[in-house]
Image (spheres, grey):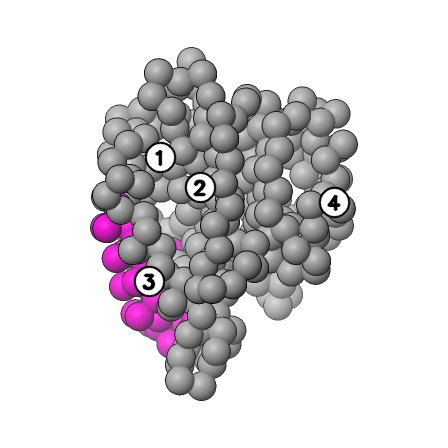
Amino acid sequence: MTISIATWNINSVRLRIDLVTSFLEAHRPDILCLQEIKCIEGNFPAAAFKKLGYTHQVVHGQKGYHGVATVARVPFIESNRRGFCGKDDARHVSVTLADREVPITLHNFYVPAGGDEPDPAINEKFAHKLGFLDEMRSWLTGAETNRPAILVGDLNIAPLEQDVWSHKQLLNVVSHTPVETEKLEAVRAAGGWVDAMRQFVPADQKLYTWWSYRAQDWEASDRGRRLDHVWVTPPLRGRLLGMEVIREARGWNRPSDHVPVIVKIAA
């Protein structure tokens, strides 16, 4: 038996619900984790997901900004929402999957983007991002990660050289600066997390999940970044079965600038 998990920064779930339903009809992941849903729970298009069999839903949203949601065709034992940096800006939700010999916790994250200027002294958004990563590192270790767990979402950092179209040109661009990549690596190392996507695509090969809206022809220029991630704790490493980046989604009508990522795990 396998379980498939998709993660996608949808950049407004209500605006792009038709794209989401088309994706679910075509790929049928067991679980879909969405980021940047941009709506409160009461405005989440729950009925559209239920119609397709995604009856188990947890939403952590706010009006107009941020927000995460996890919907599934499989049940949850429990769910939790966590605030970071003294803010309740709807950037995390976790669920515990039911009907497993050893329960699996699934975290869905939307890490702050960090603004344009990579200097925390003059850019409050960048300071928030760095603080958020520090808090993730302090929390996601020890008892939180000494068990089967999965972390997915838009982490808003492309950590490796081949996670961006030009390592040299992006070293001073938010999402690929050394301070960000080092802090993200500290989060990963603190919990012993395994980069699931790079288990299937070697670190010396290009791998992207995001292409800017500013590009006149995103596909031709292919100036992408890998901002979306799937991590697993060591007990799940040997159970990873496959990974797929749905690149064509970037070319759909009125798309998100992110594309879905699907990972399959032996249940």
Residue 134, numbered label: 3
Label whose residue precedes the other's in the sequence (3 or 2): 2
Inspect the image, locate mark 1, and give the three-letter code of the amino acid beneath it. Ala
Which residue occupies the foreground of this view, 159 or 111?
111
Indicate the secondary structure of the residue bearing disc 4. helix
Q: Nearer the viewer, residue 37 or 21?
A: 37
- Looking at the rendered image, the quarter that the C terminus falls into is top left
- Amino acid type, label 4: Gly
Estimate the spatial distance between the alpha carbons at disc 1 and disc 4, rounded to whole Å.
29 Å
Which image quarter holds the N terminus? top left
User: Residue 210, image x and y in percent?
Assistant: 52, 55
Marks 1 and 4: CB-CB under 8 Å? no
The crowding category of the residue bearing disc 1, from other C-alpha atoms within 10 Å (few below 14, some 14 to 19, many at least 20), is: many
Report the span colored magenta.
163-191
- How far apart are the two marked residues, 3 and 1, measured between alpha carbons? 19 Å
Residue for badge 1: 149
Q: Is residue 151 left or right of residue 54?
A: left
What is the three-letter code of the residue carrying label 3?
Asp
Residue at x-position 27% and y-position 63% = 182
Do the residues bearing badges 3 and 4 touch, measured as CB atoms within 8 Å?
Answer: no
What type is the residue that disc 2 sits on? His
* 5 in relation to 163, above or below: above
- What residue do we see at 35% from left, 16% from top? 101
Marking on residue 42: 4
Which comes sooner in the sequence, label 2 or label 4?
4
**Residue 184 in magenta?**
yes
**First of labels 3, 4 by sequence position:** 4
* Cβ atoms under marks 2 and 4 closer than 8 Å: no
Q: What label does residue 107 carry, if any? A: 2
Whether tag 3 and tag 2 are in contact, CB under 8 A, the answer is no
Dot placed on the residue nearer the N-terminal end, 1 or 4? 4
